[in-house]
Image (cartoon, rainbow, N blue to C red):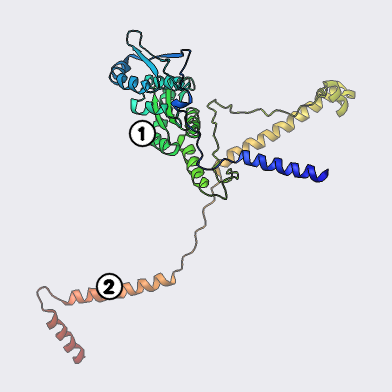
Amino acid sequence: MAEKSGSRDVVEKQEQNELLTVPEGWKEPGFSKEDNPHGMLEESSFATLFPKYREQYLRECWPLVKKKLAEFGVRAVLDVIEGSMTVATTRKTWDPFVVIRARDLIKLLARSVPYEQAVRILEDDVFCDIIKIGGLVRNKERFVKRRQRLIGPNGQTLKAVELLTQCYVLVQGNTVAAIGSHKGLRDVRKIVVDTMKNIHPVYNIKAMMIKRELAKDPVLKNESWDRFLPKFQHKQLSKRKQPFKKREKKAYTPFPPPQPESKVDQELATGEFFMKEKEKKQRKKQQQRVREVEAKKAQQERRNKAFIPPEEPAHKAHSTAGTEANSKVDVEALKKKIKKSQKTKLGANPKSVQKTEKMKVKGN
């Protein structure tokens, strides 16, 4: 019996492993017209409004939208008077999910996404996400700054996000429209929401670049990547004015504080209570004299502080041996130069002067 139960466990584990493991490059089989030859019995429709400034562009691209949706048997109507777009299924519609994709298509067109990008939503592996950012920040000036931070200078930050997530991202008004895979849309949403919460998109971009490099390594594929990812600390600086003197809270005790001593208790402790009135007055006078003497001393010390000379910095004695030698050499050289200048006359040839000097030396 034990052997049979053991063999069953092994078989169950093998079956679980086979179910959990998905082969690489596997794709879900597509849904074709042959899978539903009878079409749809009931009609489903979706409508969405569009702003006035999109009317001209929608008029131009609407024939292309109708032609593309007609391939799936979906009817599209543009109502310029009401400012709405409607998509609905017909008896020829063979894909039951295509009406949801058509609804996303008109939503993207209403959010200023160009037709070339919006039409990709009709593909099986492409999805969309419209992120509402208008209510994430209350202050309008702060909202505009953070939205601009998401776009970056000349749209460089947005381009980096698109390259890393493999998604098309468009920031328009109070929404961010993204088109791509489920994984890419999840990353885009995280970056957008964090940017609106005052976390710079560069931090998320850096973490995504590290993750992309780690995914290439088959050894680290199934391990935790927390040790490789950078950890950024969010600084919360309080703008509230802090008091100059802060009172420290004492440790909580359930017992009440001790009762302060009364004047009678203090006199009993010092022995003053049993003294006579005359002795008490003498003692008070004596204490007052002592205080006066101490105050006079302190006052005198304060006055004398102004007459105390400050301590002068001690200068190091420099070595004079080298300087004396240099001065001697300089003095001798100067004497020689002065003698030469006195001997040479203005306009005299220096060679003749040297000859006369030599003759004098020989004569001596």
Query: What's the distance in space between the residues labelled 1 and 2, CA to CA?
Result: 76 Å
Q: Secondary structure at mark 1?
A: helix
Q: Residue at x 38, y 33 (%)?
A: 152
Which quadrant would residue 359 be assigned to in this image?
bottom left
Residue furthest toward the left?
A: 347
Q: Going by the picture, which residue comes out furthest to the right? A: 274
Depth order, front residue of 5/230: 5
Residue 304 locus on image (x, y percent): 58, 41
Contact between labelled residues 2 and 1, with CB atoms less than 8 Å apart: no
* Picture disc at residue 334: 2
The N terminus appears in which quarter of the rendering?
top right
Q: Amino acid at mark 1?
A: Gly
Residue 258 to residue 317: above or below: above
Residue type at mark 2: give it: Leu
Local packing at callout 1 (Cα closer than 10 Å; few below 14, some 14-19, many 20+) is few
Image position of 339 (left or right of 262): left
Is residue 343 positioned above or below 157 on the image? below
Label 1 belongs to which residue? 155
